[in-house]
Amino acid sequence: MKYTIIIALALLLGACNKSFLEQRPIGTLDEAVLATPSGVNGLLIGAYSLLDGNGSVQSGNSSIGMNVFASMPSDDSFVGTIPNALLASIEGFTYDPTTTIFDMKWRIQYAAVQRCNDVLRILPKVSGLDEAESTQIEAEARFLRGVYHLNTALLWKNIPFIDETISYGAENYNVSNTEPVWPRIEADFQFAADNLTDTKAEVGRANKWAAKCFLVKAYMFQHKFDEAAPLLDEIIAQGVTSNGLKYDLAPHYFDNFSTATKHGPEAVFTVQMSVRDGANGQNGNTLEASGGPYGSPATTGYGWTQPKFDLVNAYQTDPETGLPLLTNYNDHPVKTDQGISSAEPFTPHEGTLDSRLDWNVGRRGIPFLDWGVHPGQAWIRSQNVGGPFTVIKHIAWKYRKDTDIEQRFTNSPLNLIRFADVLLWAAEVEVERGNLAKAESYVNRVRERAANPDGWVKKYINDNNPDEGFSTIPAANYKVGLYTGQFVENGQDFAREAVRMERRLELALEHHRLFDLQRYDNGTGYMARTLNNALEFHRKIAGFDYSYVADGFFTQGKNEIYPIPLAQIDLSTTEGKPTLIQNPGYK
Amino acid sequence: METMEIIFTKECRIRYLLYQTTKALSQNTRAGLILFLIIIAPSLAFAQVTVTGVVKDADGNALSGVSVRLMGSSVATSTDGEGTYSLPSVGPQSTLVFTYVGFETKEEPLNGRTNVNVELSPSDQSLEEVVVTGYSSQRKKDITGSVAVVDMDALKSIPSGSALQALQGQASGVNVISSGAPGAGSNVFIRGISSFGNTNPLVLIDGVESNLDNISANDIASVQVLKDAGAASIYGVRGSNGVIIVTTKKGQSGEPTVAYDAFVGIQLPLSGNPLNLLNSEDFARLTKIANPGTTLFQNGIPDYTYAGPGAAGVANEGDPAVDPSRYVFDPINTAGNYIIQKVNKDGTDWFHEVFKPAPMSSHNLSVSGGTEKATYLLSLGYFDQKGTLIESYLKRYSLKVNTTYNVGKHVRVGQNAYAFYKQNPDFTNQTQFGNMSNIFRMMPIIPVHDIRGNYAGSFGGPQLGSDANPVAVQERTLNDRDNEWNFVGNVFAEADVLTNFTVRTSLGGSVINNYNQAFVFTPYERREGNTNPNRYSERAGYSNNLIWTNTITYKNQFGDHDLNVLAGTEAIKNTARNVSGGSQAFFSTDYEYLILGNGTSNVTNSSSGGKNSLFSLFSRVDYSYQNKYLLGVTIRRDGSSKFGPENRYGVFPSVSLGWRLSDEAFMKNIGWLNDLKLRGSYGILGSQHNVNADNSFDLFGGGYGNAYYDIRGTSNSVVQGFIQTRIGNLRTGWEENIIANGGIDATLFNNSLDLSVEYYKKSINGLLFTQPLPATVGAAEAPVINIGDIQNKGFDFSINYRGNINQAWQYSIGSNITTYKNKVVKIPDPGYFDAGTHNALGSVVRNQQGQEVSSFYGYQVIGLFQSDQEVLDAPDQEAAAPGRFRYEDINDDGVITSEDRTFLGSPNPDFTYGLNLGISYKGFDFAATLFGSQGNEILNTITQYTHFFGSPIGNKSNVLLDAWTPENKDTSVPRIESGASFSTNGVVNSYLMEDGSFLKLRSLLAGYTFDNFRLNSTRSLKLRVYLQASNLFTITKYTGLDPELNGSSSIFGVDYGNYPNNQQSFQLGINLTL
């Protein structure tokens, strides 16, 4: 007995078997397994999947949408809802480099960039992939890397460009943000434009023309109008969507925002949203989901992101010509139900309006898609601080609620670039190049759709039962007219403002506004003037409590771009010195 | 009772007595007693005698209160004032054991005698006590490392289902922090925070890694805490946070002993207005100041609020909008609901709507005994505590079986097993939007129920906020089930071989199984999510821990030399697997209907798993010369699967020395000094806590939410994608905890006073810490690497005094104090990391070089701006205005920027202390247990909400009645306003800081032990009853519910809404032995 035990003990001492300490991870893959055609394509899908801005694996990373960064601080929308010091600091330009959401957004952007780089790093190791397939994967990955960098550059301008040579293993991940980044972004789009096919078997993938449009966008932000012009001509003449439709405006304005009518001729590059797919809504429109009417059946979000009075007023049209009022539209504002409870009677504004208003802004007395007539306060979280309006574009139709809504998320598409955007760039380019008549024709092409009563919001047949459908009676006094030579007549300055106004009306709340102002500004102070005027205007509205941005002020030379997150500057420290340099004006 | 009457025909009197007792107790107790009587029945048949005698000391003085116990049982009595005793029902060949504080224990075999007089001599009995330490045991007096031995009587005096919670304040250097939620885990710190991750010590129950949360103190024989390297290095990598060694009770040879311990009690919620919230009238008045346009209070407090499709408003009695005929309600399809709520004009006391008095009871029955050849112990436990938070509870059924067998003269085999089943619904404590926060997020004007008795809430009117009715949240847990089955145990064999060798093998482990069901109702009363479909999920998991330990011990004495050598191996393997599924939109919410297949949408499933292993060699040498000079050396080599091949193995040595000065000739003659020992140790412990088993691997994966994409544009389906999920690091290796410890142990004054003072310094080098990486590496999980150093130093002090006022009155005082000085020595670039997120404040904690761990970081408030002129004169500050905070310009550059943030305090106490007092007088015993913590600060995020209207809509604090106005400037409370800003509650600032020092009377207990009931000639029954009050007071300046706040180690001392652990409770208990 005793010896048996001693022997057993000795055996165990000797049996320190190495394999006992080799424990393989469960439920994961390694690089070797992914170095196959389907593996690398899976990584590419992973790179696409952050287009929605949501779903980074790192814990503690909330996803913050461009609605926060581009619409709230602009004259498009309020934070809305309730006082939240953090979001209020974005709207009032009182943020600083420690404001946490900058760090969150920065992390998401570079997480996405490295997903693209993972594809490019593994691609050379894949066997069994023919040259053409390999090129398509490379070009799509570089396209996406360009998109992610471009959006990052819009927010911060001075950013590091992270390519596939930058990795943890190579220990070279502290990359300077003082090298020019636009040439690198252009190079990625150029490669994609040169190599991608015209169409794609899967509609969500980027094609050649999407790459060209993004290249134009990169030019626009560098004011390279002469480079953009020929490319725009080519795109407008020959461009097709990835499912092979010739670029054109969709028949109705709201087709671009409805799940049922997406994949139309206007869809240059669209983020494909999906709900009821097993992800608990996480592939849906998560970043917009906090917005929308509060306490209405259409959404269970938080009632954030409410349109500003300034935006609504801008949709007024001249009762004679149906043209927008380029200035002073706030002098005689659109009538609202601010301060009027849902139980009290209210008649909506009776003056002439652009038809796109009611596809952008939910307001009292107007049908809110097929969910019912907007009741005003009952669907607003705190009207006194958020205003009387709600956003619409990401809201799903009631008749499709069983397929298009999951919790507060919808699968309404997010258009990164749509053809109207391209046309208005073309108009902008032609104004700057002095081709005012050509610019006017692009603007009129966009306005024609808005002027067509087919695409207007109509009254319900029965207000008490929206399910009975819509009548043919317009929901408000819409009047949209075309320009008839005013561009040439009134000159370049007028034309410039007319194009800018058209962009604002057409692309409202699609989170371009702040960046458009940034582009228009180009050192002139245009952005500071516009936004300080808007702050001032909203502080004076009777019955509206704008005290949460009482101290808001846009500082020229500073607030055009956001501060590099201090956390990232600190993390970039090597040998005692930060690699990342803060943007001007921030300390 | 019928059956029993047949069994006990001979013992009518006792049966009657027990029957009466039984009747008086609850149903559960009765069931326990029946079982207990069945078990003792066979033992009542032996022929037995009564033994009497007198106990005196060496001077011939009678000793009263001497315990006289029958060896191998718990049959016992004590001597009276004349020193005489009488012990009935004793076997004529048994042995009596005489024990008395301060005297040597004496064993006296009867050998047929019925009168036994004994003389006791003074002794250093407490020092002779043998203490279980790492893989072996030592005499307490010979210990050279730092080992705290817990007083088991004090431990048992805390009425808790968890031995761990009872450990608070019972051992110097050990700080236990718990919440009041039944069954909730505790944070344990041995000598301060020594990690940014898991700080919990290794808990070994009979040598098997387990936890103390689920074991009753009744099943425990002893608890030792190993605090320094000298004591714990033998556990190598497992011991970095300290080791708690628990030995459960074993049977002793002799007649079967039956013990029944039980208590019933009631716990009371905090009284008064513990969160100091406004009533409806003040709330309405202040709301109008903050928000003059308020819809709710435009015309005073309305009688009703209502909401329905496209409608939400206020109304007074008679308004058609609140005509009950308009009321429409469907709990599942809520879109058409039209809800009418009658405003509570007095104000709903939400705290006491969810916190109610709650009963608890505990029953523990054990039978133990044995022969020379074998011993056994069987223990059954039942613990049932309702939480004061409605619908919270812990029910636990436990079984313990320990046996030993002597096979021949030299071989012993045995087993220890502990199994329990518990039902304990999860309660999410200490989160910003947990149900604790709904208590202050709900306005006082909202009633609990609407006019038709359905839940009222933020949906039923305009501007009522967005949060959930806390009563609804708790009551809607009715379809939730949380079950855990846990089995821990080992089998061992031990043999004496050759002359001085003992070999031992032990195979042990644990198996934990969970099964949970969770159902989420449609929160129809809530403004947010009121149309969400109901959801249901089921989850199951198991985890295995297998541990095989083999040791060989050599023990010998040559002349003055005493040598003890141990060598061993240990192999550990952990595996776990979980599976879960869910679906939603169930037609019925009836529990019996709920199976996953009945859901109609959003069907999900998932599973996960993990495994890791550890293999170790270790050795320990204890040597003493003349019992005066003591040396201990340990070494352990660990290999772990968590590290890559390059750094897989680590070696952890320690050495400890002791010098018993009192045995030196020059001290021998000091009469009042019984024992004096100097000791010191130095050594290294390791840690692999906080290291994921996959840490060394580059891994890819991803799921629906983060990697899949609808590339085909279907709108309702996705294509699989992959992303990098983890960055591996092959160089990561062991964390080293270098501990130096020095101390003095003394026993004085005729062995009545034990004193111990220790100084410790614990340096954690190469701290295992998730590498802070810039975003440019991507978002895959960063590896844990060896960076960062932390240091803790301080003193542990403990003192125990036992005294007699006279023969009848005896008392004891035990106290322990631990001081801490904590410092982060090094964190890699940028030299800090932030933690503790709050959705309005951002990170509240910064761990930075030179600061204490988990320090709060923000702006220092130096007062309120009193005038516009002051604002102009002061350094530029965002949103500065009269009535708002003025911050200190730390860097004196004339502008307040993020550079002006500073360290506002830390949750690390300067010291913690425990105090146990015991008094006995004849049959009476009294005990008090106190625990205190001094110098810890709290960041109270609740005030960020309740002291500011510039936070989401909900109730606010009474302090706002004293808010700043141009007329009321002599206040620290900022002005009332609707917005939040940098200069109010938009950033972390010192306004949120509070002193968290406290002193709690954890327990006050009075017991009475009855004279023994004689059952028959051989057995007697010992009965003690006691009455106990817990948490009679908490002395603190903290304005929140309870300054004792648990959390995770890198964000500690932040109050996000905590289930308080300072609620009073009252218990009535009995201890019955025969």
Image (spheres, coloured by chain):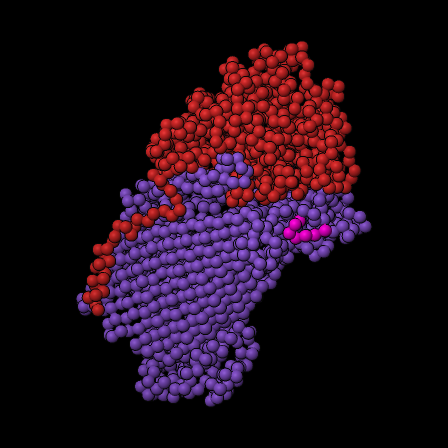
Chain colours: A red, B purple
Residue A489 to residue A306: above or below: above
The answer to whether one can see residue A302 in this image is no
Residue B587 to residue B35: above or below: above
Q: Is residue A240 left or right of residue B772?
A: right
Q: Residue at x 50, y 37 (%)?
A: B710
Q: Position of residue A13 (x, y in %)?
A: 23, 56
Q: Which residue is drawn at 49% across and 68% down?
A: B382
Residue B398 to residue B620: above or below: below
Q: Where is residue B263 in the image (x, y as percent from the top left)?
A: 52, 70
Picture mark count: 0
Q: In this view, does B302 lie to the left or right of B82?
A: right
Q: Quadrant of the C terminus of chain B?
A: bottom left
Task: State the extent of the magenta-drawn residues as a range.
Answer: B328-334
Q: Position of residue A498 (x, y in %)?
A: 64, 18
Q: Where is residue A236 in the image (x, y as percent from the top left)?
A: 55, 19
Q: Does the magenta stretch include residue B332?
A: yes
Q: Which residue is drawn at 68% across and 39% down?
A: A371
Provide the major secondary structure of the magenta segment.
loop
Q: Quadrant of residue B414?
A: bottom left
Q: Quadrant of residue B974?
A: top right
Q: Does the magenta stretch include residue B918?
A: no
Q: Residue at x 34, y 81 (%)?
A: B95
Comparing B271 with B687, the one in front is: B687
Comparing B995 with B692, the one in front is: B692
The answer to whether one can see residue A13 in this image is yes
